[in-house]
Amino acid sequence: MAERVLVIGSGGREHALAWKLAQSPHVKHVFVAPGNAGTADNGKISNSAVLVSNHTIVIQFCKDHNIGLVLVGPEALLAAGIVDELRAAGVRCLGPCAKAAQLASNSSSSKAFLERHGIPTARWRAFHEPQEACRFISSSDFPARVVRARGPAARKEVTIAASKEEACRAVQEIMQDRMFGEMVVIEELLQGEEFSCSCFTDGVTVASMPPAQPHKRLLEGDQGPPTAGMGAYCPVPQVPEAFLEQIRDAILRHIVDSLRQEGAAYAGVLQTGLMLTKEGVKVLNFKCQFGDPQCQVILPLLKNDFYEVIQAAIEGKLCSFMPAWSEDRTAVCVVMASPGYPGDSDKGMEVTGLLQAKELGLQVFHGGTALKDGRVVTNGGRVLSVTAVKQNLMEALGEANRGVATIHFQGATFRRDIGQQGLRLLQQPLYVSPAVTRDIWSLPQTSAVTGRSEGGGFAAFFDLKASGYDDPILVSQTKGLGPKVQVAQVCKRHDTIGQDLVALCINDLLAQGAEPLFFLSHLACGKLDAEVMETIREGIAEACRSAGCAFLGWEVTAVAAPCPAGHCDLAGFVVGAVERGQRLLGLQRAEEGDVLLGLGSPGIHGRGFGVVRNILLASSLRCSSPAPGSCGHSTLGDVLLTPGKMFSPALLPVLRSGHVKGFAPTAEGLLGGIARVLPEHVSAVLDALSWKIPEIFCWLYKEGNLSAEEMAQTFPCGIGAVLVVQKDLAQHVLQDIQRHQEAWLIGKVVAPSGSHIEVENLAEALQLSSPQQLLSNTTAQSQLQPRKRKVKVAVLVSGAGSTLSALIGSAREPGSCAQLVLVISNKSGVEELRNAARAGIPTRVIDHKLYGSRSEFDSTIDRVLEEFSVELICLSGFTRVLSSAFLRKWKGKILNASPSLSPLIKDGSTHQEPLEGGFKVTGCTVHFVLVSGLRAGMAEAALAERLQEAALSAFPRALQLVASGAAWLGAHGRTCWRRDSYRPSPQEQGHGAPSPPAAEPQEHDGLWAGP
């Protein structure tokens, strides 16, 4: 059933949101409140006069008009808690809670958050008195010339001063009558390349968007006063993909995880303004929604249904619905502003030429416009955002400027140089930076290649004519290994990851029909190990020799904060060439009746290793254990680190034969790979019994308790790449490929159906070590083992705990053995109840004050637990003492976290004694709750934060261990472990917890973790 949607706001951003939502078949109508001339009676879009500043009226409007989804644009409303109130009233809404929205609305709060979590930002100080602020500006050893303040009606005042004197004048003007608030923040003036990185998040998963570069100054050449934005372009060519992966992991994901740990789980869109300085990338600011004009260049590149992406973020299912972006398109937006902007601007001037701009194929998003007597007139500072989407930056910029030239209103102000910085960098020749150690957050400045560096660096020339090309097109690809490198560190095996990296890059190059020419790589690690570095380098060099491409060299850098200690990552960059007429077109050529060929590959890549790590936590196997089905000849770590198959050069003649319509690697998942070569107007059906699935995938499926759909989305399942060919040529092409490697006919292209890609018989195939045996076994179907049932878990809260969000996130991960079915609180109105409701978990309030005795109170809780068939209980800040009868009934089924390493401190105060005794480790013990006496102890303030971090990490892990059966409470009242059960090392946990000694017996007092 199609939904009605409400978008709150009146700018170009809100017009773009409504425009993208209206394209969804799931959306019946989009109301925009208050809207502008562009959103007034425009197809499925119309304006509403609802008073958005009154949350009660907005809620009533939503109920009266059956609104199924609300998107809030203005940050002032987010900070005022409109999302909290809408959700409390049962209205679905995308956006952060008021606490999380403080990132954007409160400068000092956001700066303190960044500082608290070790995320790089400009140096700063907050002041309540102008005299103190001016003394700081005059005496600081850095250019303290950015003055930020916040005032009534969420108005934000930012001054970027040219001198210390100007900065002091700005402070005096801002604070003299307190019109902009009681506090001013003074920041360091940073120099460098400014851009923004945004993401969708459901509070756990982070789905990054292409980077955008806004142009903040009013006039060309970055002159004039700062504005909210005079234009933008997306993506940003000077920010390579490998660098974006670092930003996603070390900044975006770090922010989302930190907010969740602080009890402010963030679900919505998060935008970070970043500055690439000489010292590295630093965070400038936040927006808790799309930025304006960044929104106008990002959304046109989104390939998915925007409504479906939003629903996935709200429902916590973003990990299974990652948005896809147009890779061969660039968007440019030029803002047209009224005279006087960014100050008071004129209104009521007629705007003409909008129809002509539309005829040019441009999208014009309205901001400060209104309708007057049927005419569009100006009604604010930034009037229009003229957006063009083309194949490259130069074409898009030209089209946007042509559109601006067709639109007229008196005194229109705009810039003609939007995107010129990106064009200048694109026109520079390739530069290979010197091979020196450097901070990972620094990027080399682009410049011309002049030959070999006398200082020991390297540079290279490549003669395309000598390579036999007549009219070549250069193709480049960048890839990173991500979590796979961390698993290699745990296994202490690095000889395959270099090969893996080269294979990833070159296979993606083949998707364009290109031949690899030369390869470079970049290793980032916290502690340099010469032997490990040499092993990785040799693997890369050997893989390049096999591929027939030159290995120019690599660069090794030291990792800086906010990357965690021990972090290591490896990225590669390859350049190839293809004759102009031989480039594969792929996506537009697959037709109904074509067949799909699958190329065998045993490797696991990308996000799949995040799931692998979670499976290992609860598994009975270690990385050093014999691999499943290997008869002891190889370890689990060896199999997990098996490199993916590199298909060049043997496959190149087949791709260039003209018989192949499309080719796509499947490193990021079987479904994602096939989607790259499958147009929207057709579907695909695969038969998992038609190819050989390596044993490791069968083990991951069973051990991880994954569904067949999760397997196909996360892992390649033994298929390294997919080819699309005509049916009558399929056998001919298949035979050519099979001369060099394993390949199968795995599926076909069919008419559109309910599912874009369907993999039949995958569950059956994964349940057998040799799936093809099923074809000759008529009784196999009855012998298949059902998927492991998830343990039903209830969480008891009192408003004093902070681990519920972490438990929710853990239960949602693929392969989780636990299902949160109920949250019970003995106090109403606590934040945990709202968190549970947002996650779709039933809640109950059982107020202990309403019961005459503890046993009566506990009996009520017990009845509710029975009603929901609960099997395991977690206590998250539950402050009531449970009765002995209750504890005896639920013996071995209640988990709690104590804020200290209880096994180390047997008697006395578990909080004071570690400090007095000189302990260097803090943490928590997750333990079973039994009938016992209470032990007094007072928590020390200095330990509170670190203990909370430990609980957030340990409690979800302990829940998975107990739910999976890896740990349980024995009859003797002690914790038992499954024989040879896997216990993560400190490196795998990501913190410095002490590991139990190898000779320790199979019984332990608790499940350990430290921060």
Image (cartoon, helix red, strand yellow):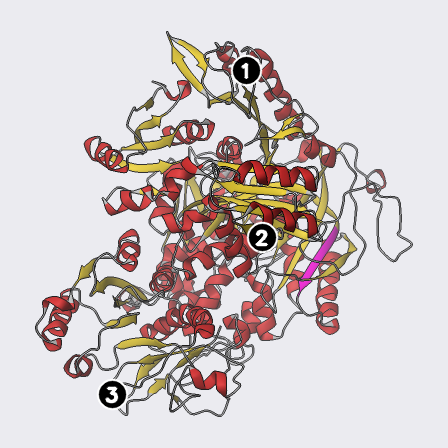
Q: Main secondary structure of the magenta part?
A: strand
Q: Is residue 520 magenta?
A: yes
Amino acid type indicated by mark 2: Arg
Amino acid on which the number 3 mark rests in the picture? Ser
Three-letter code for the amino acid on which mark 1 is drawn: Leu
Are circles 2 and 3 on residues that touch, CB within 8 Å?
A: no
Residue 739 in the image, given as x and y percentages of width and height = 62, 54
Magenta stretch encompasses residue 834? no
Judging depth in this view, the residue of 553 and 507 nearest the camera is 553
Q: In the rendered image, which quarter is residue 48 located in?
A: top left
Label 1's element?
A: loop
Q: Measure the alpha-carbon separation of dots 1 and 3.
A: 78 Å
Which residue is denoted by mark 3 in the rendering? 932
Q: Who's the residue at 42% across and 30% down the image?
A: 14
On screen, residue 890 above or below 860: below
> Vertically, is 553 above or below 994?
above
Q: Gap between marks 1 and 2, in whole Å?
A: 49 Å
**Disc 3, SS:** loop
Q: Are marks 1 and 2 in contact (CB under 8 Å)?
A: no
- Mark nearer the N terminus (2 vs 3): 2
Q: Which residues are drawn in magenta?
A: 519-525
Residue 478 visible within the image: no
Q: Which residue is mark 1?
A: 360
Name the residue that disc number 2 marks: 125
